[in-house]
Image: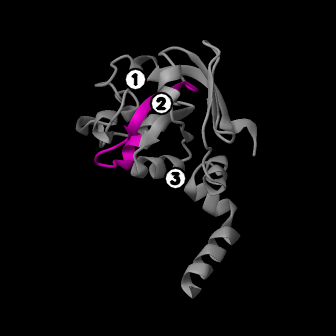
């Protein structure tokens, strides 16, 4: 693993139960990803699409990405250039969609309580840790599985499949013979 799964940036803090419909409202759904990025999360925080910078880190509570499971929500967030998203708990479909496009995600119970908007954070996806460099607080959770870490390192599912065809041929063979 390289250091590309160690990220540092300013914190954008959101609450609990953030649905994909709030992340990418209907009026931006059919735009290109770079155009969606100009409006992503604007209903939750109008400053986010205006001032988010590459490498910034989103922290949210429980159930981030719930509701309709719009795959475009993860793509629109990635298009903003954010470094990663750390939550108490992701909606499962969003969690899968994020990893498939190479967007680093981390779940850590209690993370919402140790950050404030604008805090400087350092996130180590591989170790499952968040360090709040502003307050000095840190927290540890469970990192994603080795498979998901490999997928993130490759840049998402398709680049991972291209880089590791032997892995997928073994998996398909196991599935077909079991």
Residue under circle 3? 100
**Element marked by disc 2:** loop
| For marks 3 and 1 on the same chain, the one whose residue lies earlier in the sequence | 1
Crowd tier of the residue under label 1, counting other residues whose Cα lies within 10 Å: few below 14, some 14–19, many 20 or above: some
**Element marked by disc 3:** helix
Question: Residue 30, relative to residue 169: is it above or below?
Answer: above
Residue 6: % across, % down: 68, 33
| For marks 2 and 3 on the same chain, the one whose residue lies earlier in the sequence | 2
Which is in the foreground here, disc 2 or disc 3? 3
Residue under circle 2? 80
| For marks 2 and 1 on the same chain, the one whose residue lies earlier in the sequence | 1
Side (left or right) of 68 relative to 95: left
**Element marked by disc 1:** helix
Residue 108: % across, % down: 54, 36
Q: Name the mark on residue 49.
A: 1
Which is in the foreground here, disc 3 or disc 1? 3
Identify which residue is drawn at 47% across, 30% down: 80
Question: Residue 39, relative to residue 136: is it above or below?
Answer: below
Question: Residue 25, relative to residue 143: is it above or below?
Answer: above
Residue 73: % across, % down: 38, 41
Side (left or right) of 149 relative to 114: right
Pick the quarter of the image with the C terminus: bottom right
Identify which residue is drawn at 38% across, 40% down: 63
Residue 58: % across, % down: 49, 28
Instruction: Tell me if residue 72 is in the magenta stretch.
Output: yes
Q: Residue furthest left?
A: 27
Identify which residue is drawn at 68% across, 60% down: 163
Q: Which stretch did the figure color magenta?
A: 54-73
**2 and 3 marks in contact (CB < 8 Å):** no
Crowd tier of the residue under label 2, counting other residues whose Cα lies within 10 Å: few below 14, some 14–19, many 20 or above: many
In whole angstroms, how far apart are the C-alphas of marks 3 and 1? 23 Å
């Amino acid at each position: 693993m390289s250091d590309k799964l160690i990220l540092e940036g300013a914190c954008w803090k959101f609450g609990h139960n953030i649905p994909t419909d709030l992340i990418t409202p209907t009026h931006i759904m059919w735009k290109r990803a770079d155009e969606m990025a100009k409006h992503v999360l604007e209903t939750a925080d109008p400053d986010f699409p205006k001032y988010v910078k590459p490498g910034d880190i989103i922290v949210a509570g429980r159930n981030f990405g719930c509701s309709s499971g719009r795959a475009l929500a993860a793509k629109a967030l990635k298009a903003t250039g954010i470094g990663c998203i750390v939550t108490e708990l992701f909606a499962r479909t969003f969690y899968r969609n994020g990893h498939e496009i190479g967007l680093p995600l981390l779940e850590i119970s209690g993370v919402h309580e140790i950050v404030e908007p604008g805090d400087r954070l350092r996130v180590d996806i591989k170790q499952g840790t968040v360090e709040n460099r502003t307050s000095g607080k840190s927290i540890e959770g469970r990192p994603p599985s080795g498979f998901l870490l490999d997928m993130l390192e490759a840049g998402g599912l398709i680049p991972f499949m291209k880089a590791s065809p032997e892995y997928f041929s073994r998996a398909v063979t196991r599935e077909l013979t079991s």
